[in-house]
Image (cartoon, coloured by chain):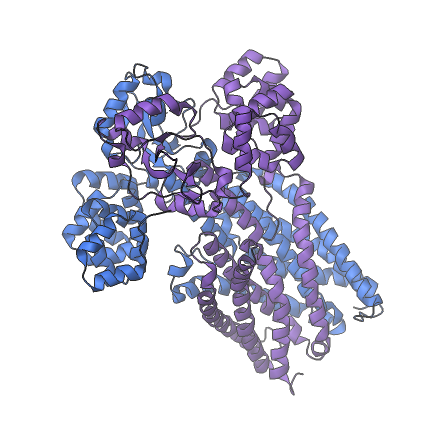
Chain colours: A purple, B blue
Amino acid sequence: MPAAIASPSEWTELVAQQRWEELREKLERTHVSDIAEMLTELPPKERAIVFRLVSRERASEVFGYLPPNEQKELIHSLTADEVKRMLNEMRPDDRTRFFGEMPAEVTRKLLEELSPEELKESRELLGYPPESVGRYMTPHYVSISPDMTAGEALEHIRKVGRNSETLNAVYILDANGKLLEDIRLGSLVLADPQTKVTDIADPALVSLHAMDDRETALVLFEKYDRVALPVTDAQGYMLGIVTVDDMLDVALAEATEDIQKIGGSEALDAPYTQVSLWEMIRKRGGWLSALFLGEMLTATAMSFFEGEIARAVVLALFVPLVISSGGNSGSQAASLIIRALALQELKLRDWFRVFRRELISGLALGFMLGVIGFFRIVLWQHLHLTNYGAHYLLLAFTVWASLIGVVMFGTLAGSMLPFILRGLGFDPAASSAPFVATLVDVTGLCIYFSVALLILHGTLL
Amino acid sequence: MPAAIASPSEWTELVAQQRWEELREKLERTHVSDIAEMLTELPPKERAIVFRLVSRERASEVFGYLPPNEQKELIHSLTADEVKRMLNEMRPDDRTRFFGEMPAEVTRKLLEELSPEELKESRELLGYPPESVGRYMTPHYVSISPDMTAGEALEHIRKVGRNSETLNAVYILDANGKLLEDIRLGSLVLADPQTKVTDIADPALVSLHAMDDRETALVLFEKYDRVALPVTDAQGYMLGIVTVDDMLDVALAEATEDIQKIGGSEALDAPYTQVSLWEMIRKRGGWLSALFLGEMLTATAMSFFEGEIARAVVLALFVPLVISSGGNSGSQAASLIIRALALQELKLRDWFRVFRRELISGLALGFMLGVIGFFRIVLWQHLHLTNYGAHYLLLAFTVWASLIGVVMFGTLAGSMLPFILRGLGFDPAASSAPFVATLVDVTGLCIYFSVALLILHGTLL
């Protein structure tokens, strides 16, 4: 278990009693990630005070662990000198992410605080598109040359490795900086010191391109079980590395985003507990209103069939049942396809294969639900639970037939919409369960009443 | 980019032409993970042939990367000797997962093939509950004693490290096997060889308990950015380690499971493309039928209000609009809360805080949608798009008031259901969007018609 974690109230108390030495000592024994978590729970004023007590070497690391909002606030409470020192000491990948979250003009102002060297690094990393591998890259890695022995390589690492983001893997580059192989530190340590590094390099080099999407990086990390992957440009020249801890963050963040979108709200971009009530209502209200406007079409569709409903009120009873079945089968299909696309189990070109498959699934599922619906109506009639009138059998057939149509349409809409969105360059997860349900509700009504007109014409209608 | 990956058809061709030497050579240059992927795409017969050509040392690794179904099939096509050798050479954590996926009697039979030592290991790991940290543990790590220097430690690692799952971190244990500190291999290499290991150990030891849930492990990995974490028993004695590559798999698998459940189907437990059509229909049909049975209550609820609908058909027009708004707000809330619970941003004890918050959100969102609905009706009436009759204003108020009630109920049901499920020991993700929608549909109907009776009594009703 993590050691020496105190509750926020303990910190607040120490601050209130101005027991600085004790605070400083406690901070020294606390993991940077825990300090960051604690800071987010303190009121802003005390946050700045406690942050200043963190030792110089660790302050930039703590800052890197803070959520964007807290970073922004904290920057304002620090002196220009403190900001400058901290920015220059931050890890390049943390810094890129921090700059990426700030408004453009703040970023521009802060970039001026960097030393020429760090500025160059930051400008390059910020040049890559958001969510590309380049944004997660750090240029701080250890490279070795192909003619070194294991012993020489270890000696080299001892000399230059202190500043590296990780030492778990080192990289063999040729004289021009082209990536040849990667090699685990463990393999170097295990090898006979006289062995050539090229003879112990791990087989099958896997590398990323700086312009790759972060989801692609994630899939490669998952597949090859690496703790770091090298990043090259299109010509194979080494640019930096991406580490697995960032990928774990990406995996969780991507899934959170997708789940929130599938649920039908904007991505919150922060933990539930840290989003203010009004921000939350805004993010949810937007989508909810859009869906509401779409769902209004159901009222319009229903009004077309007002005459039919007046003549056969019994038809209205099954409206929620029929249309919700379409919505449910649509949500199922959409969430399965969205996830398969995210994990790259499915590619855009697979759409027709999926279409065929979902068509059959939809027919089968609709038929099945139709059977249940049919017998529900017949049974209730015979048990005298509800009286659906003399034409109850025709009504039962209407429900059966519409369910086949509605469920099939729901399944197809739910499965194709993510492909269409991906094809248009949008996030497939935007085809949320509520969005699909709304789409299917309107169509479902039309299917239901059309089937009713067809089957019940001359009897009920 | 990964090197030397051939397409399945190339493999099939080589098999057909019996070019064994070429095949063997190609396999030697292919990453084990790519071999496993290729094997899943080959027909079963060729799969066994190609698998036999993989070199002995790598066969068990390839086997570990295969999905459970392919593992099961392959086991049947191998001789008893081959199975025995492979099982004994598999990594303990891969083996545990493999045994965990097999039917109990197959596991029992296979366990007999293990050497006494491996058997003991496997029995211990299988003793931990599924999805606990123990199941992902490997006992193959390197421990060092607290009185070693960095140089001695490196020498020790060189001697005993070959069998370790990872060398990125090594563990300082006292004479009794109690975990004292962990230390990165990189720190050992960087340190002066004369330094005591206890002086370079990384601060703030973080460790897991074997009985911890895998989600807890995931949260700690994410928070502390480690590549491996030590696992101890309740007394602090070291049992093994868990590595980050397994946690990345867990992160993706947990998210997939949650997304599929939120979408309203059983977890598929395999990639979309690898689930057979009938298996898919079965897994989706089960939930869909259950939801359908629940949704039948809407027909029952509607039939209670059949008289009201007959008197005021116009009421029926807004049924889909009102109830779907409740469903949508419920899906939103459910997905937000399910994810926050999974990431441990929320704990069970936070339920009341969430309740209060969602109550306010629900009221605000319902009020907002109500306003839109109200003006939609008034506008349509004045533009003569639809004629809602003389009492259209009262109708508009009915829709407004019901929306407040329905959306609030939806938000509360969606947010509390995951807590209730977690409290009862179930997976919160089972409170899927369609499930919440169904629940809210039935209640929404009752709210809508009750409000209508209240407001429209004496006029329309």
Of B395 and B31, nearer the camera is: B31
Which residue appears at 26% of the width and 62% of the height? Answer: B12
Residue A185 is situated, as x and y percent measured from the top left of the image, at: 32, 31
Q: Residue at x 70, y 50 (%)?
A: B365
- Residue B115 visible at all: yes
Quarter holding residue A98: top right
Relative to B178, is B411 above or below? below
Question: Could you say which quadrant of the image residue A235 lies in?
Answer: top left
Q: How many labels does the image show?
A: 0
Q: Position of residue B193 (x, y in %)?
A: 30, 17
Q: Is residue B419 visible?
A: no
Q: Would residue B112 be found to the left or right of residue B33 on screen?
A: left
- Give the residue furthest to the bottom: A458
- Residue B271, image x and y in percent? 40, 56
Front-lying residue, A131 or B123: A131
Residue at image position (38%, 35%) is A176
Quarter of the image where the C terminus of chain A is located: bottom right
Quadrant in which the N terminus of chain A appears: top left
Seen in the image, is A144 located left or right of residue B385? left
- Which residue appears farthest toward the front when viewing the image? A176
Q: Is residue A201 depicted above or below A352 in this figure?
A: above
Q: Where is residue B168 in the image (x, y as percent from the top left)?
A: 34, 31
A149 left or right of A396 in image: left
Q: In which quarter of the image is residue A184?
A: top left
In the image, A176 versus B241, the foreground residue is A176
